[in-house]
Image (cartoon, coloured by chain):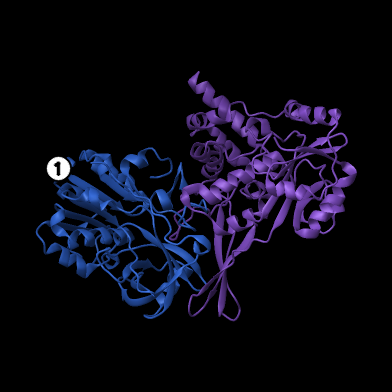
Chain colours: A blue, B purple
Amino acid sequence: MTASLVRSYPKRGGDLLYAPQPAHIIRTKQLTALERMLEIRFADGQDLGHRPGQFVQVSVFGYGEAPISICSSPARKGSFEMTVRNMGGLTAALHRAKEGDTIGIRGPFGTGFPMGCMQKMDCLMVAGGIGMAPLRSVIDTVLADRDRYGRLIVLYGSRAPGDILFTDEIEGWKADERNQIMVAVDREAPGWSGHVGVVTTLFPQVKVKPDGVAASLCGPPVMYRFVLAELHAMRVPENQIFLSLERRMKCGMGKCGHCQIDGRCVCIDGPVFTAEETRSIHESI
Amino acid sequence: MAQKAVLDAANLAAWLGKIRGRSSVMAPVKRGRASFAFSWIDDAAEVRLDYVRTVLSPKQAFLPSREPLMTVQRNSLQVSSAVAGDPFVLFGIHPCDLMAVNQLDWSMLKRNNVEDPYYRARRQAAAIVAVDCMPDKYCFCTSVGSCSTREGADIFMTPVPAGYLVEALTDRGSALLKSAKTRGPSKDDEAAAQAFPERKRRRTILKIDAHAAELPDLFDLAYSSEAWENTAKRCYGCGTCTNVCPTCFCFDVRELADLTLETASRWRQYDSCQFADFALVAGGHNFRGDRPDRVRHRWFRKFVYLNREHGQPFCVGCGRCSQQCTAGISLVDVINSVIAEAKEKVA
């Protein structure tokens, strides 16, 4: 199997290259104290046409633009979703925004997770914190076309029970016996009877054939080194491991220079890379 | 071969005046006691072609330090793009800066298959008149292949005792040259112009101790060199080097709402990989939080990453960063120490 990570170029060029397209917030859902999910529809009704793992540049009037992952599956037509953590001026504005408000969207940008490489394979998702958001896009894509894929194994590490995203959906994922869904929180907490420990402590419960698994990773920078060590110990080939790198990005098109690491622009050559690639990319992990 | 003519020194100002009468002109002028700057000129007599280097590079003609990208309407998010390009002449740039324009053409118009509309508009609107020059102790153009760049110029001028031997290299250049009072070159003019590049090469003392194409592999050997730590100890992280660099193109994007809150404008401005927050993301994680990493990134981006991608280092040997560095860091000294270390490793 060879990974086919496909670059994505701006849909609109010319004078409108940097211009966001108007879109409306059509539904909001508070997921945790810090995270809110927004459902977005373009004003002209078109589909975003993204791949799981891609991101958009979101414009909020007066605040500017920020890169945010898409958390819904391309199978959803007419709208897409993103999960926003309230961290700064622009994201706080997105938390205050009401249904019907207009924002701007550029994108989708980046490679995304190669769904074609995951077909017939066991799909292992390793998520840390808000890294669950882009992986939900992958998970929903698998679930929307369930028979094309092998088992779905989700390892999801969260700081505390209150930080867990998509709690109601996770229960739904568990309903299919082909799915193995495991959630861990970092420390003991009142009312939490599930697993306690960082996400790597879930690995002993994972039984897969190294050749038959495709692993998708998204989480904080510190998570990757440890998860890659686990996958390495399981002898999962590095070109069957896909991980999404976060970086500062301004343009999303390989121009502004912020996300350059080694010879790559994370916005356009990534954010999803194979573990094989990242091994030779300085500053990636 | 382009038609050659001689523009006597006494006729330069008159020609510039005619050009200025038809379009805007950006050209070098004297600033203060010893500095030069590229400036939009009113009076042709201000223009000084006897400069070695300007403080800021002529990239500002195509990539201003700050420029509006668009205005946005509050309710509709209706966007008015600010792409504009009135014809102008960029006059009197040196071969190194001309090569830098070619590098920027690649990075802004070709790299990653994306064409930046703001850069394109200004670039297409420009006619470029280049003039050859003699180096000072900061110049190292012979080490990066920029000492005799002509590509990208509409007119190339070589200093000769009587004035300049001028060659129109494009139709746009021929048209521009029509308004100049020129004469046919004498044998002495031809000989002086022909000897110029070799004289220039001989007088370029500062050198990188390896061929530009070897730098990526040599730098790779010195990725963990102490040179980065040592340079970082002296560096203030002020960003002067990237501001004055003719090939640096990294930018930040900012949005400013008007007081009425009805419209906002989105701007881009020079950013610097030497600033502490260059790779900082929401939540506080800084992917290049240590100064040695930022210092190494600058050298690697110029001499390794973009060199491999484009086949040329993103440095044209103009010497600005070394001359302007607030901490007195010499770009070439750092490169040569890295080369020495790498060569020791393979020896």
Residue B208's place in the image compared with B319, above or below, is: above
Residue A165's place in the image compared with B78, above or below, is: above
Task: From the viewer's side, name the closer residue of A51 and B4.
Answer: B4
Tell me where residue B54 appears, x and y as whole percent: 75, 46
Task: From the viewer's side, name the closer residue of A262 and B92.
Answer: B92
Secondary structure of the residue carrying numbered label 1: loop
Tell me where residue A184 appears, x and y as whole percent: 23, 58
Q: Residue furthest left?
A: A177
Q: Quadrant of residue A139?
A: bottom left
Quarter of the image where the C terminus of chain A is located: top left
Tell me where residue B108 appears, x and y as whole percent: 55, 51
Q: Quadrant of residue B328?
A: top right
Residue at image point 42% right, 55% down: A9
Residue B258's place in the image compared with B61, above or below, is: below
Tell me the residue that label 1 is attached to.
A209
Q: Is residue A163 left or right of residue B325?
A: left
Q: Is residue B317 left or right of residue B76?
A: right
Q: Residue furthest right?
A: B10
Quarter of the image where the N terminus of chain A is located: top left
Q: Chain of mark 1?
A: A
Q: Quadrant of residue B23?
A: bottom right
Residue at image point 59% right, 55% down: B119
Using a 10 Å C-alpha cutoff, classify the residue at mark 1 as few (fewer than 14 neighbours), some (14 to 19) or many (20 or more).
Answer: few
